[in-house]
Amino acid sequence: MGKFSLLCHPATPPLHVRGVQVVWRAEAGGVRLRWEIARAESVVMPRAAGRHARADGLWKHTCFELFLASDGAPYRECNFSPSQDWAAYRFAAYREGMAEAPMPAPAIRSSAGAEDGVAARCEVDLASGVLAGASKAGLCAVIEERGGHLSYWALHHPAAKPDFHDSAGFTLAIAAAEAP
């Protein structure tokens, strides 16, 4: 299990949010990721619509993201909304050759309200096959606060503008994240 703090991109400071952390836990049959938002009174959490389906454009609102890659150019992007909608894409190269990636539907649970010092959280259970072939990951979050204000959070921001697709931001070694 690992716990990782995300950094807000300096070009998009939050209004009130004071931090975002991700807990990565290897589980039998998969991995559980939990994004925790500190001081989230103003965060807009999309409500569960009962669809729990693939959907595009989730990054336009509060959304939690996982990028997966190996040493080669192809990579995958997974988006998870507190609404329980999700998406998975594969790219042949940096922002090129985008196609829907096969992925079993993840279990997504979210909550808001101060407990344990965490004001909002989103927990995602992924089947073990989702990580297949990947050796590194990028953990990210788009946080929307009231009034439509967006801030962009990641383990590492390698560019002057927020860009989760930049492979220099895929800094988490999956083997290290899954170590006990």
Image (spheres, rainbow, N blue to C red):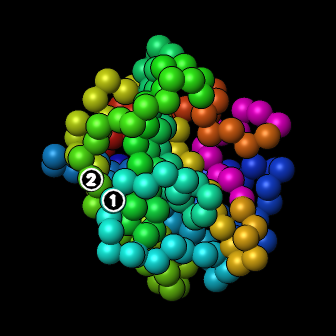
Q: Amino acid at mark 1?
A: Ala
| Foreground of the two, 5 or 166 | 166
Can residue 175 be found in the magenta stretch?
no
| Image marks 1 and 2: residues in contact by CB distance under 8 Å | yes
The residue nearer to you, when weighing 90 against 154, is: 90
Tell me, yes or no, whether the highlighted magenta stretch contains residue 155: yes
Estimate the x, y position of residue 73 in percent, counting from the top left.
51, 16
- Label 2 belongs to which residue? 105
Where residue 1 sits: x, y (%)? 35, 49
**Mark 1 nearby-residue class (10 Å; few <14, some 14–19, many ≥20):** some
Q: Nearer the viewer, residue 119 or 102?
A: 102
Mark toward the start of the polypeptide (1 vs 2): 1
What's the mark number on residue 12? Answer: none
- Looking at the image, is 150 positioned above or below residue 117? above
The residue at 63%/75% (across/down) is: 43
According to the picture, the residue beneath numbered tag 1 turns out to be: 53
For residue 12, above or below residue 45: above
Range covered by the magenta-colored residues: 151-160
